[in-house]
Image: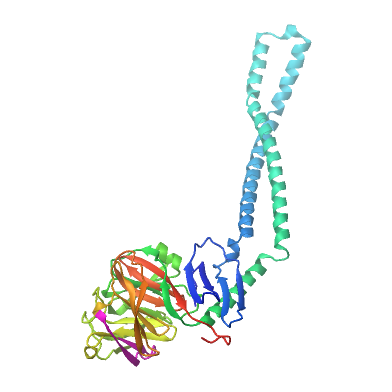
Amino acid sequence: MRLFPGLLLLLSAGSPAMQTLFQSPDEGWQVYTSAQAPDGKCLCTAVIPVQGSCSRDLRSHQLRQLTEKVQNISQSMEVLDLRTYRDLQYVRNTEALMKGLDSRLRVAAESQKSLNAKSFQELKDKMTELLPLLPVLDQYKADTRLIVHLKEEVRNLSGSLLAIQEEMGAYDYEELQQRVLMLEARLHACMQKLGCGKLTGVSNPITIRASGSRFGSWMTDTMTPSADSRVWYMDGYYKGRRVLEFRTLNDFVTGQNFVQHLLPHPWAGTGHVVFNGSLYYNKYQSNVAVKYHFRSRSVLVQRSLAGAGYNNTFPYSWGGFSDIDFMVDESGLWAVYTTNQNAGNIVVSRVDPQTLEVLRSWDTGYPKRSAGESFIICGTLYVTNSHLAGAKIYFAYYTNTSSYEYTDIPFHNQYSHISMLDYNPRERVLYTWNNGHQVIYNVTLFHVIKTSGEL
């Protein structure tokens, strides 16, 4: 499971809903508590730390400020040292001139008769040569004041560092970092124990980037370890073959550090998904599912989805060759499509990720052309009633009970045209491509954890 920086997890006995909220990366957390309420529910409050979170706490912020001050003082000292050395050399060079002038002045004072016009002019010339020494002496005075100021700054820095050291006690940075990693591991374990739940809410949209055409898809791996933060980007909805792989989310935002994969078969629609290092997509002008492995840059397997419509036969309401939609939830790989036998209603099928064989299918009874998009969480298929502004999550089909219900979950469609919507169970967020914008939503799941830790 990979967590975005600043992801906040809340679960309380009074409100047994899991809620994930993206916060500003600059906001700290410094909180981790876990207990069990008397009624048997899990009481858990935690803010997931950002990577290297020690750098974001108050003390480290103060230390960074102090370090900057020390650097500034060091630079000032270097400049002062260079200037003092230069001025000292100048004073040494004028020492002989000053001695000669002093000798001539003594002679003139003892015998004023010997001071003729020529001698007086020579004295004036010598004095003129010494005039540049005046600003050097003025600089010495200013440097003396600067040295006093720097001494006071160093004294203040020493006091601040001593105070921080006393507050932090015996912990050094490495030890604090180890504690952070341990808390991260505990928090991951806590989230795994939370398990599945029923969707009760979707957050406001969070725009990650604005790029590409009106239609497309983007995603992270739904299964790989959290250390893998790669992002995949596929612009367009048909006949495309170019997949961009970005090293991190930050690289994706800036459009840097990416490699290109050229698929051997073009894709149709935007219902692609990356699962355990492979891309699953619909081959253009067919109902063939393709599994493309990124590391080997090869197709591992391809198989036809028997009876599945394709080539805009049964797309979502927005069209775009969206007949076949692959998705992943906590239990594995799924395919959403429609067949003639199902009269245009959505079929959701469990698919073997190794062989692409359909393991089991459910007829939801919901007409696919009336659906804006769909996604699956914990075996429940959620369907939006439109791809345009004003959409909401309108329908839910529960594969564990083969039952459905109509829902009314608000869904803010900020850019008015969604052409891709997928749930990532590792991050527990929704990914969308909305009119040339790459957007995510956090989800709120409702569930109760029993005393034994089982759902």
Residue at the image position 25 percent from the left and 77 percent from the top: 370
Q: Eyeballing the image, is 143 above or below 255?
A: above
Q: Residue furthest top?
A: 113
Q: Position of residue 288 (x, y in %)?
A: 28, 86
Kindly indicate the quadrant of the structure image that contains residue 185. Answer: bottom right
Q: Is residue 388 visible?
A: yes
Main secondary structure along the magenta-highlighted residues: strand
Q: Is residue 247 left or right of residue 387?
A: right
Instruction: Give the magenta part as a residue range.
Output: 347-368
Q: Looking at the image, is 100 positioned above or below residue 214? A: above
- In this rendered view, identify the residue nearer to me: 377 or 249: 377
| Residue drawn 26% across the image and 91% down it | 306
x%, y% of residue 141? 68, 32
Asked if 82 appears above or below 428 in the picture, the reply is above
Instruction: Decide if residue 190 is on the left or right side of residue 445.
Output: right
Residue 147 is situated, as x and y percent measured from the top left of the image, at 69, 40
Residue 198 placement: quadrant: bottom left
Is residue 358 visible to the viewer in this orientation of the structure?
A: no
Q: Position of residue 247 (x, y in %)?
A: 44, 70
Quarter of the figure with residue 437? bottom left
Q: Is residue 418 left or right of residue 52?
A: left
Which is nearer the eye, 117 or 67?
A: 67
Q: Residue 357 in magenta?
A: yes
Question: What colouring method underlies this structural image?
Answer: rainbow
278 vs 117, nearest the viewer: 278
Asked if residue 14 lies in the magenta stretch, the reply is: no
Q: Nearer the viewer, residue 11 or 285?
A: 11
Residue found 37% across the figure and 88% down from its top: 399
Residue under the point 33% across and 85% down: 335
